[in-house]
Image (spheres, rainbow, N blue to C red):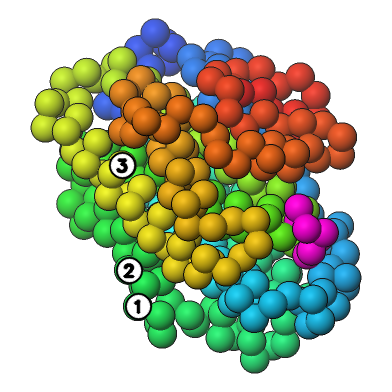
Amino acid sequence: MDRTIIFNPQGDRETSKRKVIFGNPTNIMELNNVKYQWAFDLYKTMGFTNFWVPEEIPMHEDKKQYEKDLSPYEKRAYEMVLSFLIALDSYQVNMLKEFARYITAPELVMALTSQEFQEALHSYSYQFILESVVEPQVADEIYNYWRQDTVLMERNQVIAQLYNEFIRHPTEENFIKATFGNYVLESLYFYSGFAFFYTLGRQGKMRNTVQQIKYINRDELTHVTLFRNIIQTIKQENPELFTPELEKWVYEFFKYATDAEIKWGQYVTQNQILGINNTLIDRYIKYLANLRLTQLGYKPLYPEITENPMKWIDQFRTINDTKTDFFQAKPQTYAKRSELKW
Protein backbone atom coordinates (compact mmCIF):
# COMPACT_ATOMS: atom_id res chain seq x y z
CA MET A 1 0.00 0.00 0.00
CA ASP A 2 1.11 3.56 -0.68
CA ARG A 3 0.97 6.29 1.93
CA THR A 4 -1.00 9.41 1.20
CA ILE A 5 0.90 12.62 0.53
CA ILE A 6 0.33 15.96 2.26
CA PHE A 7 -1.04 17.80 -0.78
CA ASN A 8 -2.17 16.26 -4.04
CA PRO A 9 -3.14 18.93 -6.62
CA GLN A 10 -4.30 16.18 -9.02
CA GLY A 11 -6.65 14.70 -6.42
CA ASP A 12 -10.41 14.30 -6.80
CA ARG A 13 -12.83 16.78 -5.21
CA GLU A 14 -15.95 14.77 -5.95
CA THR A 15 -17.24 12.95 -2.89
CA SER A 16 -18.61 10.22 -5.16
CA LYS A 17 -15.00 9.22 -5.87
CA ARG A 18 -13.94 9.26 -2.23
CA LYS A 19 -12.97 5.95 -0.59
CA VAL A 20 -11.71 4.90 2.83
CA ILE A 21 -8.57 3.48 1.20
CA PHE A 22 -7.26 3.53 -2.38
CA GLY A 23 -8.84 6.93 -3.09
CA ASN A 24 -7.18 9.92 -4.74
CA PRO A 25 -7.79 12.83 -2.34
CA THR A 26 -6.39 16.33 -2.53
CA ASN A 27 -6.06 16.07 1.29
CA ILE A 28 -7.59 19.51 1.68
CA MET A 29 -10.17 19.41 4.48
CA GLU A 30 -13.26 20.51 2.53
CA LEU A 31 -15.72 19.83 5.32
CA ASN A 32 -18.73 21.42 3.66
CA ASN A 33 -19.07 18.24 1.63
CA VAL A 34 -18.20 15.00 3.41
CA LYS A 35 -18.99 11.49 2.21
CA TYR A 36 -18.77 9.58 5.49
CA GLN A 37 -21.04 11.54 7.81
CA TRP A 38 -20.56 8.93 10.54
CA ALA A 39 -16.84 9.75 10.61
CA PHE A 40 -17.47 13.49 10.89
CA ASP A 41 -20.06 12.93 13.62
CA LEU A 42 -17.61 10.76 15.57
CA TYR A 43 -14.91 13.40 15.16
CA LYS A 44 -17.18 15.98 16.80
CA THR A 45 -18.34 13.60 19.51
CA MET A 46 -14.82 12.56 20.46
CA GLY A 47 -13.32 16.01 20.12
CA PHE A 48 -16.00 18.13 21.78
CA THR A 49 -19.06 16.40 23.23
CA ASN A 50 -17.11 13.84 25.23
CA PHE A 51 -14.21 16.04 26.31
CA TRP A 52 -13.18 15.54 29.92
CA VAL A 53 -10.22 16.26 32.20
CA PRO A 54 -8.84 13.71 34.72
CA GLU A 55 -8.16 16.39 37.35
CA GLU A 56 -11.87 17.10 37.58
CA ILE A 57 -12.18 13.87 39.56
CA PRO A 58 -10.60 14.13 43.05
CA MET A 59 -8.72 10.97 44.04
CA HIS A 60 -7.91 11.44 47.75
CA GLU A 61 -10.61 9.05 48.98
CA ASP A 62 -9.27 6.34 46.68
CA LYS A 63 -5.81 6.76 48.17
CA LYS A 64 -7.24 6.13 51.65
CA GLN A 65 -9.16 3.07 50.47
CA TYR A 66 -6.20 1.67 48.58
CA GLU A 67 -4.10 1.84 51.73
CA LYS A 68 -6.70 0.58 54.22
CA ASP A 69 -9.61 -1.23 52.56
CA LEU A 70 -8.33 -3.21 49.58
CA SER A 71 -7.31 -6.82 50.10
CA PRO A 72 -3.86 -7.92 48.86
CA TYR A 73 -5.58 -9.61 45.89
CA GLU A 74 -7.51 -6.44 45.06
CA LYS A 75 -4.35 -4.34 45.26
CA ARG A 76 -2.50 -6.73 42.97
CA ALA A 77 -5.33 -6.73 40.44
CA TYR A 78 -5.71 -2.94 40.64
CA GLU A 79 -2.04 -2.47 39.81
CA MET A 80 -1.82 -5.12 37.09
CA VAL A 81 -4.96 -3.99 35.29
CA LEU A 82 -3.68 -0.41 35.21
CA SER A 83 -0.35 -1.66 33.86
CA PHE A 84 -2.09 -3.47 31.01
CA LEU A 85 -4.39 -0.56 30.18
CA ILE A 86 -1.36 1.73 30.05
CA ALA A 87 0.18 -0.57 27.42
CA LEU A 88 -2.99 -0.74 25.32
CA ASP A 89 -3.48 3.01 25.11
CA SER A 90 0.23 3.48 24.42
CA TYR A 91 -0.14 1.27 21.35
CA GLN A 92 -3.08 3.29 20.15
CA VAL A 93 -1.35 6.64 20.46
CA ASN A 94 1.43 5.32 18.23
CA MET A 95 -0.64 3.22 15.81
CA LEU A 96 -3.51 5.52 14.89
CA LYS A 97 -1.21 7.85 13.00
CA GLU A 98 -0.03 4.82 11.01
CA PHE A 99 -3.60 4.03 9.98
CA ALA A 100 -4.19 7.67 9.05
CA ARG A 101 -1.28 7.64 6.59
CA TYR A 102 -3.18 5.20 4.39
CA ILE A 103 -6.70 6.59 4.79
CA THR A 104 -7.94 8.60 1.81
CA ALA A 105 -11.03 10.29 3.29
CA PRO A 106 -10.22 13.57 5.08
CA GLU A 107 -13.16 13.35 7.49
CA LEU A 108 -11.95 9.93 8.57
CA VAL A 109 -8.41 11.21 9.14
CA MET A 110 -9.94 13.85 11.42
CA ALA A 111 -11.82 11.17 13.36
CA LEU A 112 -8.61 9.19 13.82
CA THR A 113 -6.92 12.36 15.06
CA SER A 114 -9.63 12.82 17.68
CA GLN A 115 -9.24 9.21 18.75
CA GLU A 116 -5.48 9.62 19.04
CA PHE A 117 -5.99 12.60 21.34
CA GLN A 118 -8.36 10.58 23.52
CA GLU A 119 -5.88 7.70 23.77
CA ALA A 120 -3.22 10.15 24.93
CA LEU A 121 -5.71 11.55 27.45
CA HIS A 122 -6.31 8.03 28.77
CA SER A 123 -2.57 7.56 29.23
CA TYR A 124 -2.52 10.78 31.22
CA SER A 125 -5.52 9.63 33.24
CA TYR A 126 -3.70 6.45 34.29
CA GLN A 127 -0.71 8.53 35.32
CA PHE A 128 -2.98 10.85 37.31
CA ILE A 129 -4.59 7.86 39.04
CA LEU A 130 -1.21 6.40 39.94
CA GLU A 131 0.33 9.62 41.23
CA SER A 132 -2.81 10.25 43.29
CA VAL A 133 -3.30 6.77 44.76
CA VAL A 134 0.03 4.95 45.12
CA GLU A 135 3.52 5.90 46.24
CA PRO A 136 5.97 6.99 43.50
CA GLN A 137 8.04 3.82 43.84
CA VAL A 138 4.94 1.65 43.37
CA ALA A 139 3.86 3.71 40.36
CA ASP A 140 7.27 3.17 38.79
CA GLU A 141 6.98 -0.58 39.39
CA ILE A 142 3.53 -0.64 37.78
CA TYR A 143 4.85 1.08 34.67
CA ASN A 144 7.57 -1.58 34.52
CA TYR A 145 5.44 -4.67 35.20
CA TRP A 146 5.51 -5.72 31.57
CA ARG A 147 9.26 -6.33 31.79
CA GLN A 148 8.94 -8.54 34.85
CA ASP A 149 5.69 -10.46 34.42
CA THR A 150 5.76 -13.06 31.64
CA VAL A 151 1.96 -13.29 31.40
CA LEU A 152 1.66 -9.52 30.96
CA MET A 153 4.44 -9.56 28.38
CA GLU A 154 2.57 -12.27 26.49
CA ARG A 155 -0.60 -10.18 26.60
CA ASN A 156 1.19 -7.10 25.36
CA GLN A 157 2.50 -8.97 22.33
CA VAL A 158 -0.84 -10.09 20.87
CA ILE A 159 -1.92 -6.85 19.19
CA ALA A 160 1.57 -5.34 19.03
CA GLN A 161 2.71 -8.11 16.70
CA LEU A 162 -0.14 -7.37 14.27
CA TYR A 163 0.63 -3.67 14.33
CA ASN A 164 4.37 -4.17 13.88
CA GLU A 165 3.80 -6.57 11.00
CA PHE A 166 1.80 -3.91 9.14
CA ILE A 167 4.37 -1.19 9.84
CA ARG A 168 7.20 -3.41 8.57
CA HIS A 169 5.21 -4.81 5.65
CA PRO A 170 2.36 -2.42 4.72
CA THR A 171 0.41 -4.76 2.47
CA GLU A 172 -3.34 -4.64 1.94
CA GLU A 173 -3.83 -7.86 3.89
CA ASN A 174 -1.75 -6.63 6.82
CA PHE A 175 -3.70 -3.37 6.86
CA ILE A 176 -7.02 -5.22 7.13
CA LYS A 177 -5.62 -7.49 9.83
CA ALA A 178 -4.37 -4.47 11.77
CA THR A 179 -7.84 -2.89 11.65
CA PHE A 180 -9.29 -6.08 13.11
CA GLY A 181 -6.55 -5.98 15.75
CA ASN A 182 -7.60 -2.45 16.62
CA TYR A 183 -11.24 -3.49 16.81
CA VAL A 184 -10.42 -6.39 19.13
CA LEU A 185 -8.24 -4.20 21.32
CA GLU A 186 -10.93 -1.57 21.71
CA SER A 187 -13.95 -3.85 21.97
CA LEU A 188 -12.63 -6.87 23.86
CA TYR A 189 -9.26 -6.36 25.51
CA PHE A 190 -10.22 -3.51 27.79
CA TYR A 191 -13.25 -5.23 29.20
CA SER A 192 -12.06 -7.69 31.81
CA GLY A 193 -10.11 -4.76 33.24
CA PHE A 194 -13.14 -2.52 33.21
CA ALA A 195 -15.18 -5.32 34.80
CA PHE A 196 -12.68 -5.56 37.65
CA PHE A 197 -12.92 -1.84 38.41
CA TYR A 198 -16.70 -1.93 38.19
CA THR A 199 -16.70 -4.87 40.61
CA LEU A 200 -14.82 -2.69 43.10
CA GLY A 201 -17.23 0.18 42.44
CA ARG A 202 -20.20 -2.07 43.06
CA GLN A 203 -18.83 -2.62 46.57
CA GLY A 204 -18.29 1.10 47.12
CA LYS A 205 -14.52 0.85 46.65
CA MET A 206 -12.24 3.10 44.59
CA ARG A 207 -15.19 5.09 43.29
CA ASN A 208 -13.12 7.87 41.78
CA THR A 209 -10.92 5.44 39.88
CA VAL A 210 -14.16 3.90 38.64
CA GLN A 211 -15.35 7.34 37.51
CA GLN A 212 -12.16 7.81 35.49
CA ILE A 213 -12.68 4.35 33.98
CA LYS A 214 -16.29 5.18 33.07
CA TYR A 215 -15.12 8.16 31.03
CA ILE A 216 -12.44 6.02 29.38
CA ASN A 217 -15.00 3.28 28.71
CA ARG A 218 -17.33 5.80 27.06
CA ASP A 219 -14.49 6.96 24.82
CA GLU A 220 -13.57 3.41 23.89
CA LEU A 221 -17.13 2.78 22.73
CA THR A 222 -16.79 5.55 20.15
CA HIS A 223 -13.51 3.97 19.04
CA VAL A 224 -15.24 0.61 18.64
CA THR A 225 -17.87 2.33 16.53
CA LEU A 226 -15.25 4.05 14.40
CA PHE A 227 -13.32 0.91 13.54
CA ARG A 228 -16.44 -1.18 13.08
CA ASN A 229 -17.57 1.35 10.47
CA ILE A 230 -14.10 1.44 8.89
CA ILE A 231 -14.02 -2.34 8.50
CA GLN A 232 -17.57 -2.55 7.17
CA THR A 233 -17.08 0.31 4.70
CA ILE A 234 -13.81 -1.10 3.38
CA LYS A 235 -15.58 -4.43 2.91
CA GLN A 236 -18.36 -2.71 0.94
CA GLU A 237 -15.92 -0.74 -1.23
CA ASN A 238 -13.26 -3.45 -1.64
CA PRO A 239 -14.92 -6.85 -1.19
CA GLU A 240 -12.06 -8.56 -2.99
CA LEU A 241 -9.83 -7.93 0.05
CA PHE A 242 -12.02 -10.13 2.24
CA THR A 243 -10.96 -13.46 0.82
CA PRO A 244 -12.07 -16.82 2.26
CA GLU A 245 -8.61 -17.09 3.80
CA LEU A 246 -8.98 -13.73 5.51
CA GLU A 247 -12.47 -14.55 6.77
CA LYS A 248 -11.10 -17.80 8.24
CA TRP A 249 -8.33 -15.80 9.89
CA VAL A 250 -10.90 -13.45 11.48
CA TYR A 251 -12.50 -16.31 13.39
CA GLU A 252 -9.14 -17.78 14.35
CA PHE A 253 -7.92 -14.41 15.57
CA PHE A 254 -11.06 -13.76 17.60
CA LYS A 255 -10.73 -17.21 19.18
CA TYR A 256 -7.08 -16.57 20.00
CA ALA A 257 -7.85 -13.10 21.35
CA THR A 258 -10.75 -14.36 23.47
CA ASP A 259 -8.69 -17.14 25.00
CA ALA A 260 -5.89 -14.70 25.79
CA GLU A 261 -8.27 -12.22 27.43
CA ILE A 262 -9.90 -14.93 29.55
CA LYS A 263 -6.49 -16.21 30.63
CA TRP A 264 -5.40 -12.69 31.55
CA GLY A 265 -8.57 -11.82 33.45
CA GLN A 266 -8.37 -15.00 35.48
CA TYR A 267 -4.66 -14.53 36.12
CA VAL A 268 -5.19 -11.00 37.38
CA THR A 269 -8.10 -11.76 39.70
CA GLN A 270 -6.85 -15.19 40.88
CA ASN A 271 -10.46 -16.21 41.56
CA GLN A 272 -10.09 -14.16 44.75
CA ILE A 273 -12.10 -11.00 44.00
CA LEU A 274 -15.56 -10.80 45.53
CA GLY A 275 -18.16 -10.47 42.78
CA ILE A 276 -16.09 -11.72 39.85
CA ASN A 277 -14.84 -15.29 39.48
CA ASN A 278 -13.22 -17.39 36.77
CA THR A 279 -16.53 -18.65 35.41
CA LEU A 280 -17.97 -15.15 35.10
CA ILE A 281 -14.85 -13.90 33.35
CA ASP A 282 -14.97 -16.79 30.89
CA ARG A 283 -18.63 -16.30 30.02
CA TYR A 284 -18.45 -12.49 29.94
CA ILE A 285 -15.51 -12.35 27.53
CA LYS A 286 -17.11 -14.98 25.28
CA TYR A 287 -20.35 -12.98 25.35
CA LEU A 288 -18.43 -9.87 24.27
CA ALA A 289 -16.63 -11.79 21.52
CA ASN A 290 -19.99 -12.93 20.14
CA LEU A 291 -21.35 -9.40 20.34
CA ARG A 292 -18.39 -7.83 18.56
CA LEU A 293 -18.42 -10.44 15.81
CA THR A 294 -22.15 -10.09 15.16
CA GLN A 295 -21.81 -6.30 15.07
CA LEU A 296 -19.46 -6.85 12.12
CA GLY A 297 -21.88 -9.24 10.45
CA TYR A 298 -20.11 -12.46 11.45
CA LYS A 299 -21.57 -15.48 13.21
CA PRO A 300 -20.89 -15.86 16.95
CA LEU A 301 -18.01 -18.06 18.05
CA TYR A 302 -19.81 -19.29 21.15
CA PRO A 303 -23.48 -19.91 20.27
CA GLU A 304 -24.11 -21.40 23.70
CA ILE A 305 -23.46 -17.96 25.27
CA THR A 306 -26.57 -15.91 24.53
CA GLU A 307 -26.87 -13.54 27.51
CA ASN A 308 -24.60 -11.11 29.31
CA PRO A 309 -23.66 -12.87 32.58
CA MET A 310 -22.69 -9.54 34.17
CA LYS A 311 -25.71 -7.40 33.39
CA TRP A 312 -25.14 -5.38 36.53
CA ILE A 313 -22.30 -3.62 34.70
CA ASP A 314 -25.01 -1.65 32.91
CA GLN A 315 -25.49 0.46 36.04
CA PHE A 316 -22.06 1.95 35.33
CA ARG A 317 -23.24 3.34 32.00
CA THR A 318 -24.41 6.56 33.64
CA ILE A 319 -22.20 9.64 33.46
CA ASN A 320 -23.66 12.87 34.83
CA ASP A 321 -27.13 11.26 34.90
CA THR A 322 -26.84 10.33 31.22
CA LYS A 323 -26.70 6.72 30.10
CA THR A 324 -24.19 5.41 27.61
CA ASP A 325 -25.78 2.35 26.05
CA PHE A 326 -23.07 -0.30 25.76
CA PHE A 327 -24.69 -3.02 23.76
CA GLN A 328 -27.11 -1.80 21.12
CA ALA A 329 -26.20 -2.21 17.49
CA LYS A 330 -25.92 1.06 15.57
CA PRO A 331 -24.22 4.14 17.00
CA GLN A 332 -25.25 6.80 14.54
CA THR A 333 -26.89 9.67 16.44
CA TYR A 334 -25.60 11.95 19.17
CA ALA A 335 -28.50 13.59 20.95
CA LYS A 336 -26.85 15.56 23.73
CA ARG A 337 -23.69 15.99 25.73
CA SER A 338 -22.28 12.75 27.16
CA GLU A 339 -24.82 10.54 25.37
CA LEU A 340 -23.73 7.85 22.94
CA LYS A 341 -26.46 5.73 21.37
CA TRP A 342 -25.67 2.21 20.26
Taking the spot 51% from the left edge, 49% from the top edge, the residue there is 280
Q: Disc 3 residue type?
A: Phe
Looking at the rendering, the stretch of residues picked out in magenta corresponds to 201-208
Circle nearer the N terminus (2, 3): 2
SS for callout 1: helix
Residue 101's x, y, as percent? 37, 43
In the image, taking residue 69 as reference, residue 140 lies left or right, namely: left
User: If the image is split into quadrants, where does the N terminus sit?
Assistant: top left
Q: Label 3 vs label 1: CA separation?
A: 22 Å
Q: Secondary structure at mark 3?
A: helix
| Disc number placed over residue 154 in the picture, else none | 2
- Residue drawn at (20%, 30%), measured in percent from left and top? 247
Classify mark 1: residues with Cα within 10 Å, few (<14), some (14-19) or many (20+): few
Q: In percent of the image, x 88 and y 73: which residue is there?
A: 60
Where, quadrant-wise, is the C terminus in this rendering? top right
Tell me which residue sits at (64%, 46%) in the image.
217
Instruction: Choose the circle earlier in sequence order: 3 or 1.
Output: 1
Q: Secondary structure at mark 2?
A: helix
Horizontally, residue 182 falls left or right of residue 49, namely: left
Rendered position, 126 above or below 296: below
Q: Residues within 10 Å of mark 3 (few under 14, many from 20)?
A: many
Q: Is residue 335 above or below residue 184?
A: above
Q: Which residue type does callout 2 highlight?
A: Glu
The answer, for residue 121, to whether it is visible in the render is no
The residue to which callout 1 is attached is 150
